[in-house]
Amino acid sequence: MKMKIRVCQGVSGIIVVTMVTSFMLVYNSSNSSSSPPTSSSSSSRRLDAPAPSTTKRPDTPQRLRTSTLEGYAGVVDRKPLEMHCRTCALVTSSGHLIGSKRGEEVDRSECVIRMNDAPSVGYQQDVGRRTTLRIVAHSSLQRVLRSRQELLNASQDTVFIFWGPSSCMRRDGKGHVYNHLRLLNQLLPKLKVYIISRFKMLKFDELFKKETGIDRKSSNSWLSTGWFTMATALELCDRINVYGMVPPDFCRSSSHPIVPYHYYEPSGPDECSMYLSHERSRRGSHHRFITEKAVFANWARTLNIHFYQPDWKPATIVASMNSSDSAVPPGS
């Protein structure tokens, strides 16, 4: 709990410094042009796409047949998110996207989903230009504000969903991140800002335990932004095209290519080193990157989820996951 409070307070400190200097720039930009139509409206344009899969989806979150997504509440008005997409491009932050030239392919999707502060400017050829939905961790809010010229000024048609522990997101005046998101949304009323409710966060925990047998809290794990993004996409999208996500056994091969964890931080840590260190960690809070990818691969066997860059299909990894070398045991 102390760690959570320190994280929230650390985030709030820089927000206080940057908020006043940033909102006027964003506000002026938002007033300089009219807002284009957005896919968050129930009357938004739909592109031709394959019919949605009729296979039963995971119990939680359930696939909603309407455009109302419960558990995602507007920061100011508390209204649920109204959004639906036939085709979604879920663009990861992986270094595998460097030089991929997938940008035009990504932009042809009805909705483009990105995570945290991953930029598109300067990387359009590989990751595309458009952003329909951006899912952001509470700990990444400060980085989003630092990139306000791109991520806020040019985001009048982007929906932002923030997730975080209840200590940061509570609405009783003690949730530091929520307080600053509310202030940001009051200053920039055209910005579409939502938070994941406490009840919904518990559902995501339950889903993780149901799919893996691992209790997130007792294993001292944090679900990654990738987990929240994929689970949300299951509710939002009929078809999900994932760009830059490796199969769960990828990093166990000694011959795997070395790529940066983030495509926009080429000098940053190696992706597989990050995955393996977190998966094996026993101290402090950590993510279960490889375990999560095993769940995603399992979902993709029956749901309309497809993986590109690298291109792979779950059927090709089922056999290898049965071996002791590549399986991810519960609690590993």
Image: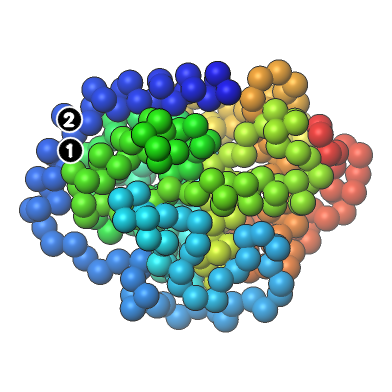
Residue topped by disc 1: 23
Residue topped by disc 2: 20
Residue type at the position of mark 2: Val
Q: Residue 21 in the image: x percent, y percent?
A: 16, 29
Q: Left of 270 or right of it: where is 76?
A: left
Q: Residue 245 in the image: x percent, y percent?
A: 60, 47
**114 shown above or below 19:** below
Q: Nearer the viewer, residue 113 or 315?
A: 113
| SS under mark 2 | helix
Q: Nearer the viewer, residue 246 or 150?
A: 150
Q: Residue at x 53, y 25 (%)?
A: 4
Residue type at the position of mark 1: Phe
Q: Residue 227 in the image: x percent, y percent?
A: 60, 46
Q: Is residue 324 visible?
A: yes
Marks 2 and 1, how far apart in space? 6 Å
Q: Residue 327 in the image: x percent, y percent?
A: 85, 42
Does the residue at mark 2 contact the one at mark 1 (Cβ under 8 Å)?
yes
| SS under mark 1 | helix
Q: Dot 1, how many residues are within 10 Å of its Cα: few (below 14), some (14-19), or many (20+)?
A: many
Determine the residue located farthest toward the front in the rendered image.
Answer: 172
The quadrant of the image that shows the C terminus is top right
Q: Nearer the viewer, residue 45 or 13?
A: 13
Q: Left of 170 or right of it: where is 305?
A: right
Q: Residue at x 37, y 75 (%)?
A: 42
**115 shown above or below 264:** below
Q: Dot 2, how many residues are within 10 Å of its Cα: few (below 14), some (14-19), or many (20+)?
A: few
